[in-house]
Image: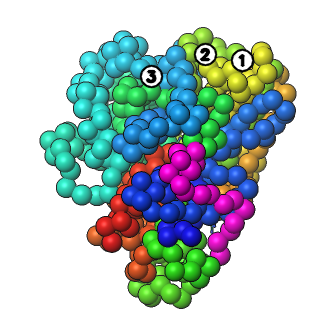
Amino acid sequence: MADAVVVGAGPNGLAGAIALARAGRRVSVLEGQATIGGGCRSAELTLPGFVHDTCSTVHALAIASPFLSTLPLATHGFEPVHPEAPLAHPFDDGTAVMLERSVDATARGLGADADAYRRLFGPLVHAAPTLFGDLLAPLRPPRHPLLMSRFGLDALRSASGLARSRFEEPRARALLAGCSAHSLLSLRAPVSAAFGMVLMLTAHAVGWPVARGGSQHLADALAGHLASLGGTVETGRVVESLDELGSAAPVLLDVTPKQLLALAGTRLPDRYRRALTRYRYGPGVFKLDWALDGPIPWTAPEAARAGTVHLGGTLEELVAAEQEVTDGRHAERPFVLLVQASSFDDTRAPPGKHSVWAYCHVPHGSTRDMTAAIEAQVERFAPGFRELIAARSAMDSAEVERRNPNCVGGDITGGLQDLRQLFTRPVARRVPYSTPLPGVFLCSSSTPPGGGVHGMSGYWAARAALRA
Ligand SMILES: Cc1cc2nc3c(=O)[nH]c(=O)nc-3n(C[C@H](O)[C@H](O)[C@H](O)COP(=O)(O)OP(=O)(O)OC[C@H]3O[C@@H](n4cnc5c(N)ncnc54)[C@H](O)[C@@H]3O)c2cc1C
């Protein structure tokens, strides 16, 4: 009975389905995996009683999202839990620089760079909701051009260039570099600074919470809200061809270009098909989840106050490590992103125990085991960590893709987010969500605004479909 179909129950597929259902469509979501959520799922990957987020865990973008933030997700079981501080970035001297909720508190930890930090982020934080509206959208004339140009002049730069020009000391430089490394770009690449700036802005404006009980609760809340609007989700249903979907319209595809090529076969015109073939995927990730017998014994005690911990040392070290990955090599001392969610959400592990999530970047499609390299980085800033490991789960890039076909080669952002592909993903078109096939739209993170659990690709794709 559905008159609209969404393929894929990731955050974008579910957000798109909700937007269609709110417009009165009878929506059916078809998900290939046994569970919904795509990059927003949880599982007992190690031992009974330990909840691990298989992909995303920090939901700053969900809170900042102009669409998801309007939905009654709390009613359906999504509860953001905020750590005391969003982020710690430890150094070899036994201290850590902290990204705190307030700009001032952060600046106070930055010595000579305190004022420079206030100047960079202070004015932007006050206008953050407005800025998020422009940034989490397809390329269009900005609604607030002055604000966007203030942001854009810095954001279009490389993280390394911005850090060196704005800050004098290693602490502030490393803080910006670590946040910018979430881009999966070389930190010498233009626009890599944008990712760091946006994430730091979200830390100040909305915080970096995890979902109580695991990210699955966020996906389930989206599905719960969809159900309240009359939509349905079918799991275990891999769609292999658009022909399976009959005459339902619109069709929203929460898939990447590689899968669109397979789903649509020869129905796509040559020119569009060739453009999709040229779409570039980025580096992959190697992910570890640990069940620990106690909290991580950080040398810098303040690191225990943070939800996320960035491990890799100085700006120079981070630039070198991320460059190795960009050049197709494995970093000997990789930059590690770690989240100690159970320190703030006691539902994730048995009393006294901890469930911790971490990953590093690796070349596209890598199958190298990075366990020792990642654990050495944790041990570097928390001697004694290894003795606490009760169990671990490891996923190389191939395994990440096996669990979610959208993570092509282990790429977690739906395709490279460099200057050429950030705004024109997947193909340069006036409406990037549309395809040459009438009624068929792409809604995954391979469309603007790109990676992250914000649901905005789904929202904008649904808007485009409803207009069409
Ligand atoms: C290890 C890791 C850590 C991350 N950390 C964070 C984080 O902390 N914060 C954050 O905001 N983001 C994070 N991300 C990124 C985030 O998970 C993704 O950007 C987001 O999930 C993209 O949403 P999506 O809906 O576009 O695609 P996905 O979440 O990938 O969902 C796509 C869905 O479509 C289904 N599908 C695909 N093809 C078919 C088909 N043919 N038939 C049926 N179903 C199909 C898939 O099974 C999947 O469920 C992380 C990702 C990973 C992998």
Q: Which mark is residue 295?
A: 1
Secondary structure of the residue carrying tag 2 is helix
- Residue 54 makes an appearance in the image: yes
10 Å neighbourhood of mark 3: few (<14), some, or many (≥20)?
many
Residue 67: horizontal and vertical position, in percent? 39, 45
Q: Earlier in the sequence, mark 1 or mark 3?
A: 3
Residue 392 part of the magenta-drawn span: no
- Nearer to the camera, 263 or 407: 263
Secondary structure of the residue carrying tag 3 is strand
Rendered position, 331 above or below 327: above
Q: Amino acid at mark 3?
A: Leu
Residue 127: horizontal and vertical position, in percent? 24, 32
Residue 234 part of the magenta-drawn span: yes
Q: Which mark is residue 99?
A: 3
Does the Cβ of the disc 2 residue fall within 8 Å of ligand 1?
Answer: no
Does the Cβ of the disc 1 residue fall within 8 Å of ligand 1?
Answer: no
Q: Which mark is residue 304?
A: 2
Dividing the picture into quadrants, the one containing residue 462 is: bottom left
Query: Mark 2 touching mark 1, by CB under 8 A?
Result: yes
Where does the C terminus fall, quadrant-wise? bottom left
**C-alpha distance separating marks 2 and 1:** 8 Å
Q: Which mark is residue 20?
A: none
Magenta residue span:
223-241
Q: How is the image coloured?
A: rainbow
Secondary structure of the residue carrying tag 1 is loop
Q: Which residue is depicted at the point 21% across and 43% down?
A: 148
